[in-house]
Amino acid sequence: MSKKSKTSAIHETDGVSQSDITNASSIDSIKQKRKAQPDTSTLVANILKGNITALSRAITLIESSNPKHLKQANAIITECLAHANKSVRLGITGVPGVGKSTFIEALGLHLIALGKKVAVLAVDPSSSLSKGSILGDKTRMEDLVKSDQAFIRPSPSGTSLGGVARKTRETIILCEAAGFDTIIIETVGVGQSETAVHSMVDFFLLLKIAGAGDELQGIKRGIIEMADAIAINKADGDNLKAAKLAKVEFNRALHLYPQKASAWQPKVTLCSALKHEGIADLWNLVLDYMKHTKANNYFEQHRTEQNKFWLLQTIEDRLKSDFFNQPEIKKALKTQLQLIEDGKTTPFTAAEFLLQLKN
Amino acid sequence: MSKKSKTSAIHETDGVSQSDITNASSIDSIKQKRKAQPDTSTLVANILKGNITALSRAITLIESSNPKHLKQANAIITECLAHANKSVRLGITGVPGVGKSTFIEALGLHLIALGKKVAVLAVDPSSSLSKGSILGDKTRMEDLVKSDQAFIRPSPSGTSLGGVARKTRETIILCEAAGFDTIIIETVGVGQSETAVHSMVDFFLLLKIAGAGDELQGIKRGIIEMADAIAINKADGDNLKAAKLAKVEFNRALHLYPQKASAWQPKVTLCSALKHEGIADLWNLVLDYMKHTKANNYFEQHRTEQNKFWLLQTIEDRLKSDFFNQPEIKKALKTQLQLIEDGKTTPFTAAEFLLQLKN
């Protein structure tokens, strides 16, 4: 049965009313079709063939909150692991209005023209609240979405950044196993999401536009330190002069920081995503970085460090959520925070009290 | 019995040999004296009177790893709480060689001359390894140590920064209850110790000296962002010109950062701790800061936020240490980290495995 007819069958069941049902066994048959999920080895085999439907299904398992799905997802990821890890992982951040979607589309099309396969993912913890997503509106990447060399997946929803980050981290592995050699992960930089994205990519790009006055004002603390490059977008027409000035200012700021562990000196470039200008230069910069960090062994070391970081992070997140999600702890924490606010207890006495409730 | 004769009694017991003992009851009496510890209410009453012996004893209880001592320490701190919180808490960081001890002595003497009572504490997690401490050598603060308006206490030892930070945090409360109105906390900035100190003080000072060339190179990531002021020390004689240049450069760097939550614009000052120059200016800056942050309510808000942060931090530290210190987890973690290094598992599968061991 083709994918299309299966989808239709499901929609029919969803739309059916009780009075329409004349044959109970036909419903059973529809339900059976609906539940039919390929087994792990079939999914893995299809992912390794680059089958997008299989990839999407496996990602849906990763994103599920059903423990059974999570178990299958873990099995799939473990199988895929040996085939992953052969990509460039590129993180992109920038505030809304900076032209992120246009930039990613331009870069993605450039990479596809070079024969690459591009997966675009997002880390946007806010999407679970707004039920939207920075990549939800795929029409903003009209041309890229049409290419069968590109795979675009909106941010998984999740109540916590930790959850969203974990899902994206695992999705990277599946995309790589499916043959995507360039993984682009975008974030709007809500809360700590840049830090999360930074900890899962090889190269971190800050996208900016030139404005009036002090270019560095309003940049979130710590973000310049994370950047391997700053691309000043919309560097065209009347904007070009301001963009060039911004480049000087950012270059100066970048030099104020101590050397990175990668021994890479971050660069500032100009581009116009709309006019597809400066995109090739930016990509060449990424390639320079890859060459540099592979030569000094930072690349592999960094990926191993990232994996170790994620192991510890996952455990810490779980220890915390297991503790703080207990109803009696929630209630007692509220009381203790109030006592702190009133100067009636110390943080340490309050912590001791809460920790003893656990036992 | 005076403090001095008591100390002697203890030393005698320590030095006594079995053959010297002729009268068992006299040993019992010595042991009793040795063990005699003032009760909680006596200690608290004496701390509130500003008695340094009582203060030191209570701090020793905080630093103890004996659960009974910790329980008494908690009781003392809770009693002292209502009398604390009426000070300026000043954090000072700077690499070795910058003249921190000389600076703290100069500032301390200036404050004492103004009628203030100054406590100097340290957060130096490395001291537990080296058995030394940045404040261990009190001779470097020769004049300050002689004043009965000053109290100097070396860094508590501890295996973790979390432990050292907790003890220092609690010691602040006791010092304040004992009438010390200015608490200076110094750190050499090992690991994350600046962040820990920053989270327990009102005002954070970075001490620097002018060098040749790029002044900002080699400054630890994030530290400039934390500073409420940068004091360039040794700004005297031949150094003065370089110090003035450094001031310009640091001022420029400080302006690159987004506005602080305190709405305070960090300042750069020159000083010569050795010649006692610029010390009064620096102190006036701290007073300006206090006035500014008390007027916009940041001061109180910030202290409450710090307390809430410490509550959560203490719980997280304990959850982590309770988990990772289990022998079976230690062993399994080592194996899982190796599997990650070999690309044989994902961070998330490994985390799941370890978390299940716990249950």
Image (cartoon, coloured by chain):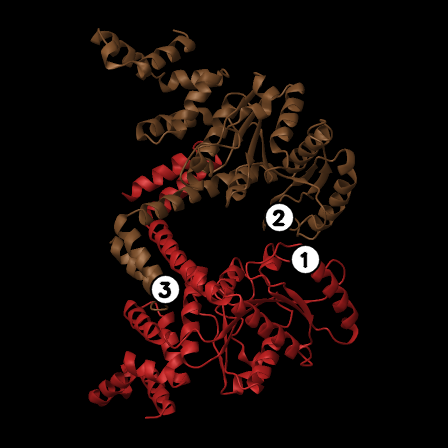
Chain colours: A brown, B red
**Residue A327, percent across and down?**
27, 48
Badges 2 and 3, same chain = yes
Q: Quadrant of residue A4?
A: top left
Chain letter of disc 3 in the image? A
Judging depth in this view, the residue of A131 and A253 nearest the camera is A131
- For badge 2, the amino acid type reads Ile
Judging depth in this view, the residue of A228 and A141 nearest the camera is A141
Secondary structure of the residue carrying tag 1 is: helix
Using a 10 Å C-alpha cutoff, classify the residue at mark 1 as few (fewer than 14 neighbours), some (14 to 19) or many (20 or more).
some
Report, in whole angstroms, how far the alpha carbon at label 2 lies from the one at label 1. Answer: 12 Å
Residue B249 seen: yes
Secondary structure of the residue carrying tag 3 is: helix
The residue that disc 2 covers is A219
The residue that disc 1 covers is B255
- For badge 1, the amino acid type reads His
**Residue B184, percent across and down?**
52, 73
The residue that disc 3 covers is A340
- What residue is rendered at 53% in x and 44% in y? A195
